[in-house]
DNA sequence: ATCAAGTGCAACCCAGAGGTTGCGCATATG
DNA sequence: CATATGCGCAACCTCTGGGTTGCACTTGAT
């Protein structure tokens, strides 16, 4: 069950995936989809001002990063946003930041006792 | 006090800043610095396999994203990693992911009652 | 059987990012 | 004063990323 993606390994790929405005628009459009069955690349291309092929590339990046899931239904491929992956990545960032802070605080405390 | 950066506005810039391996190395090197006074670009360039100018560019990106702080001391400029910014960004991601999940769960619940 | 819709793959274009070298300027230090 | 250290700016190179167009393939609809 330890699927590779945003929740494992180096998260740099996930950050790269999140570092593009269009990709965020895609993600948010997917997240706000009422169908719960997902949207196809063509459907997304209808709502966004970019080509279907561009959307397809973005979806590929997002899927590689583990931020999106796809399911093939007949001739079409439906994509769904994975909020859990985002949450996991966020928690990870949080922990790293906390670690840095506590380390800094510890050093500051030591420096104070030396004074 | 509402300084722009990772904790305000669009976080895309912060993700772009975190989407590079070298930049992570810089951040981690800064975070593991024992001085608590920060490191200069030259000091970082000594420990990393890239030029000082490259480091300087990375530091500029990180500072713009609000992930790093700089302090000029005489002729040198010391940089410190801001763990709090990382933590804030992480929390933000977490909340977005949670929102997507709850929305999806709600839709699933509605679909179930319709069955 | 024909036609439309949806996809995938490939080539191509162009702007921007990461990196380098080279220079000039400011600031400690002998 | 002379010298070494640290920095900033600018030019340049190369490669990747976002985007497009074009075409061929599958699958559902008529």
Image (cartoon, coloured by chain):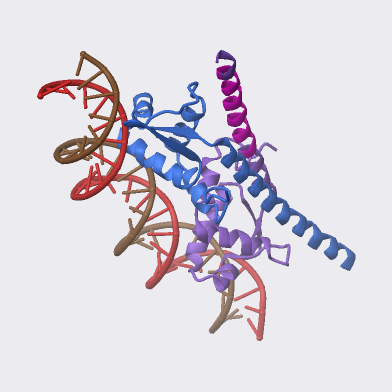
Chain colours: A blue, B purple, C red, D brown
Spot occupied by residue B94 in the image (x, y as percentages of width and height): 64, 38
Spot occupied by residue B23 in the image (x, y as percentages of width and height): 54, 58
Is A39 a magenta residue? no
Closer to the camera in the image, C12 or A73: A73
Tell me: A51 left or right of B52: left
Spot occupied by residue D10 in the image (x, y as percentages of width and height): 38, 58
The quarter holding residue D3 reads bottom right
Residue positioned 88% across, 68% down in the render: A114
Spot occupied by residue A3 in the image (x, y as percentages of width and height): 54, 49
Q: How many dots with numbers?
A: 0
Closer to the camera in the image, D10 or A115: A115
Tell me: B79 left or right of C3: right
The answer to whether B28 is drawn above or below residue A31 in the figure is below
The answer to whether B25 is drawn above or below residue C28 in the figure is above
- Which quadrant does the N terminus of chain B fall into? top right
Is B97 a magenta residue? yes
Q: Which residues are magenta?
A: B94-111
């Amino acid at each position: 069950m330890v699927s590779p993606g945003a929740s494992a390994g180096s998260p740099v790929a996930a950050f790269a995936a999140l570092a593009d405005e269009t990709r965020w628009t895609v993600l948010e459009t997917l997240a706000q989809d009422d169908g719960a069955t997902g949207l196809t690349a063509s459907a997304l291309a209808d709502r966004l001002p970019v080509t279907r092929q561009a959307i397809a590339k973005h979806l590929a990046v997002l899927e590689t990063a583990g931020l999106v899931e796809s399911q093939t239904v007949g001739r079409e491929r439906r994509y769904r946003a994975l909020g859990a992956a985002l949450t996991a990545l966020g928690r990870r960032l949080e922990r790293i930041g906390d670690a840095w802070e506590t380390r800094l605080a510890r050093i500051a405390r030591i420096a104070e006792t030396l004074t």
